[in-house]
Amino acid sequence: MDRLQAMQVFTRVVDTNSFTRAAETLDLPRASVTTIIQNLEAFLGTRLMHRTTRRLSLTPDGAAYYERCVRILADVEETESSFQSGNKKPHGKLRIDMPGSIGRLLVIPQLCEFHLRYPDIDLQLGLTDRPVDLLQEGVDCVVRVGELQDSSLVARRIGLFQGVSCASPDYLRRYGIPRTLADLAQHKAVNYFSSRTSRVMDWTFLVEGKEVSVKIKGIVAVNDADAYVTCGMEGFGLIQPARYMVLPQLQSGELVEVLPDIKPLPMPISVVYPHSRHLSPKVRVFVDWIAERFDRCELLSGRASLGNACTKRTFAELEEAGSPLATPVLPEWVA
């Protein structure tokens, strides 16, 4: 029995809480994972985990063995890396997950550069707006927007999520242009709901250094960033996306910034990975690379913002056409 492989398989089964998911992340047949665990328990002379059709749970011996395996495997990886770093580039499969809009608009267009630097890394890139459990799903690191909730993870801030309140010109002609936060009570929004909790997200603003949350009634809610922007462009309501997502539409006039003097609350963008004493070379180089890419982008680094020239011009056009805020004309599909 390969005891090092058995430790790797055992810790992966525990981390993912599944024989099947452990097999998938290790590129092994499920039957092999089952056999390795059975042989390991026979070799140690003790049961490591209780298995049912629905869940796995560690025995006291299994919990103690797991903690020691984690330390041993970290020491082995660190030892190997110390000898390999001088003459071998990072290699192996690297599983990353990030929001779809960040992946499609910011990361994928630059991936050729990453591949040229690190041709031996096999990158698996997941694009999803749902929360990802790194250990359960065998993901090496994720890009997340907002404050980190899980204290067992390590987060490195790489950018700033800057939102913008905006709407289509057609919507503003129908409803009028909000001038204050109080005016939002007379408007409709495209709402965004959490894939995990189904909770609709409030709009948040930074007012005199304090966070202010506002609930806006809506006629449609989505849980996908691209669909969110599309609904806004189709006139379903006000939206508050990331500025980098709608910069071309703001510049062309397809979307118009509203409340330009009351900015949405900015949120940190972080790359997150499990806490361990040693960060593998392939994860380290990806984290450094994506931090470098975000630092080059002014809209994500917090160093710049879009000017108001095109917005002001569109406001003037809308006001000339007539769109009184106090008495908006509601279209039939809103009534």
Image (cartoon, helix red, strand yellow):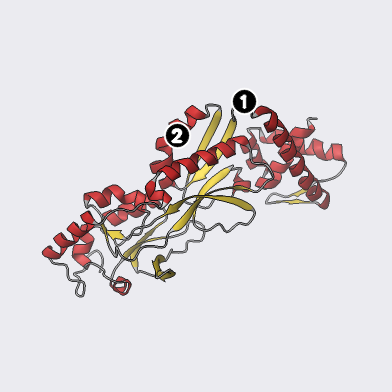
- Distance Cα–Cα, label 2 vs label 1: 21 Å
Q: How crowded is mark 1: few (under 14 residues within 10 Å), some or many (20 or more)?
A: few
Secondary structure under the numbered disc 2 in the rendered image: helix
Instruction: List the single residue furthest toward the left.
Output: 320
Instruction: List the single residue furthest toward the top.
Output: 87
Give the foreground label among 2 and 1.
1
Q: How crowded is mark 2: few (under 14 residues within 10 Å), some or many (20 or more)?
A: some
Whether residue 35 is visible: no
User: How many badges with numbers are in the image?
Assistant: 2
Q: Is residue 263 left or right of residue 210?
A: left
Q: Mark 1 points at which residue?
A: 88
Secondary structure under the numbered disc 1 in the rendered image: loop
Residue type for callout 2: Leu
144 to 280, vertically: above or below: below
Residue type for callout 1: Lys
Instruction: List the single residue furthest toward the right.
Output: 45
244 to 214, vertically: above or below: above
101 to 218, vertically: above or below: above
Q: Position of residue 97 (x, y in %)?
A: 51, 44
Which of disc 1 and disc 2 is earlier in sequence?
1
303 to 197, vertically: above or below: above
Q: Is residue 156 left or right of residue 216?
A: right
Q: Position of residue 138 (x, y in %)?
A: 61, 42
Residue 22: image quadrant is top right
Residue lying at 55% horizontally and 30% vertically, measured from the top left: 121
Q: Name the residue under label 2.
A: 111
Q: Position of residue 205 (x, y in %)?
A: 39, 66
Query: Dividing the image into 4 quarters, which one contains the C terminus?
Result: bottom left
